[in-house]
């Protein structure tokens, strides 16, 4: 048959089913879940592509979120998109997002909805008003227990409980990259079809790369060990700095070309900025599946058990050798 045609038919939902090699209820569920996440990505991408042409899309709402950050209109829109697409799905009873203080329950899906969606609706919000790359990050966990007190305490578990994770990258084209624990696969949105089409299967991150990605404006707020690592990079040939303000795009570059992304703690905020459940754990799962590593500097990100939903962790993620180098500065001072 026509190879181009076969390719166009390898859509995301079909790919998930193929990965699980069965039509079991779990496989059907995961495929449906990924399909809904893809729909959310398409809705967000559509709005972004016309943002400058529409009233009331860009800029701040005037509110401050639970993290103490100013909320942008696009954050609110994207947050609501994910809620809307999972209504009436029967799959997801709870959604927990960086933008919401408490999980959002979809009563008509509870208690039959066995899954929880964790997400960062817009990663890299500061890029919104500048027409630069943005992302969405997601993870799926199975609900454990009945959550009878409505506090979702079963989510205070390590990242190995994630069934699926990935991100959507809104760049020159819209991409979706995901894992269900069987490698990492990327898809590009074909706007003429409205479908995410498989572009690369079983992506492997190089063991080493030349890119280091960190906000060096924080230099004097870091611990000395991080400063020493950066000094090492500066005096060593072959490194290139790349930092976009949206870690989904920085980490995507590193997934493809190798290197390391860092968002270390500062002396004032030892846990750094990034949130475990919605950001660091999903990306750690994905990068490990591609053969890379993710650590706080002291422990594997996937072993961190949060004490609260919005817990933050430092993040050092990327190629094995480059992560090990940073780790050695943190643990041994060189
Ligand atoms: P956000 O989800 O609120 O946008 O925050 C996460 C983002 C990352 O995408 C990015 O790497 C980082 O925050 C940038 O922060 P900073 O401006 O402190 O370097
Ligand atoms: Mg965000």
Image: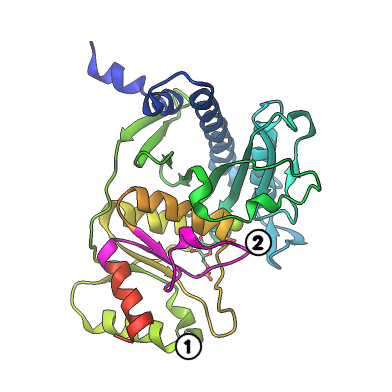
Residue at 54% over, 38% down: 41
Q: Which residues are magenta?
A: 293-321
Mark 1 C-beta closer than 8 Å to ligand 1: no
Question: Taking the image as drawn, is residue 256 in sight?
Answer: yes
Residue lying at 41% horizontally and 25% vertically, measured from the top left: 11
The answer to whether residue 131 of the structure is visible from this angle is no
* In this rendering, position of residue 53 left or right of residue 252: right
Residue 292: horizontal and vertical position, in percent?
Answer: 32, 56
Q: Which residue is mark 2?
A: 310
- Pinpoint residue 5: horizontal percent, then vertical percent: 30, 16
Closer to the chain start, of discs 1 and 2, is 1
Residue 213 lies in quadrant: bottom left
Image disc number at residue 220? 1
Picture coordinates of residue 98 (x, y %)? 64, 55
Query: Residue, x 45% and y 46% (percent of image)?
Result: 169
Residue visible at 43% across and 28% down in the picture: 16
Other-residue count near label 2 (Cα within 10 Å), few / some / many at <14 / 14–19 / ≥20: many
């Amino acid at each position: 048959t026509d190879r181009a045609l076969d390719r166009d038919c390898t859509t995301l939902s079909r790919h998930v089913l193929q990965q699980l090699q069965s039509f079991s209820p779990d496989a059907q569920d995961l495929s449906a879940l990924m399909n809904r996440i893809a729909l959310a990505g398409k809705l967000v991408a559509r709005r972004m592509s016309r943002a400058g042409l529409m009233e009331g899309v860009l800029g701040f709402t005037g509110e401050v979120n639970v993290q103490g950050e100013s909320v942008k209109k696009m954050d609110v829109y994207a947050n609501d998109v994910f809620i809307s697409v999972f209504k009436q799905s029967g799959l997801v009873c709870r959604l927990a997002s960086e933008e919401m203080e408490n999980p959002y329950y979809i009563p008509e899906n509870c208690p039959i909805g066995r899954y929880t969606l964790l997400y960062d609706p817009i990663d890299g919000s500061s890029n919104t008003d500048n027409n630069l790359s943005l992302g969405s990050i997601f993870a799926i966990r199975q609900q454990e227990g009945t959550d009878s007190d409505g506090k979702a305490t079963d989510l205070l578990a390590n990242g190995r409980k994630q069934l699926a994770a990935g991100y959507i990258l809104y760049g020159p084209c819209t991409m979706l990259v995901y894992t269900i624990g069987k490698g990492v696969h990327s898809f590009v949105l074909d706007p003429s079809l409205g479908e995410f089409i498989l572009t690369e299967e079983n992506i492997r991150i190089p063991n080493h790369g030349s890119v280091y990605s960190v906000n060096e404006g924080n230099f004097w707020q870091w611990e000395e060990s991080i400063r020493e690592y950066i000094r090492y990079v500066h005096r060593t040939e072959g490194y290139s700095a790349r930092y976009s303000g949206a870690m989904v795009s920085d980490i995507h570059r590193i997934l493809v070309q190798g290197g390391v992304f860092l968002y270390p703690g500062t002396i004032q905020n030892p846990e750094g900025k990034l949130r475990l459940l919605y950001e660091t754990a999903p990306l750690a799962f994905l990068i490990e599946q591609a053969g890379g590593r993710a650590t706080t500097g002291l422990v594997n990100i996937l072993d961190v058990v949060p004490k609260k939903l919005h817990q933050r962790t430092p993040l050092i993620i990327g190629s094995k050798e480059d992560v090990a180098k940073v780790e050695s500065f943190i643990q041994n001072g060189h």
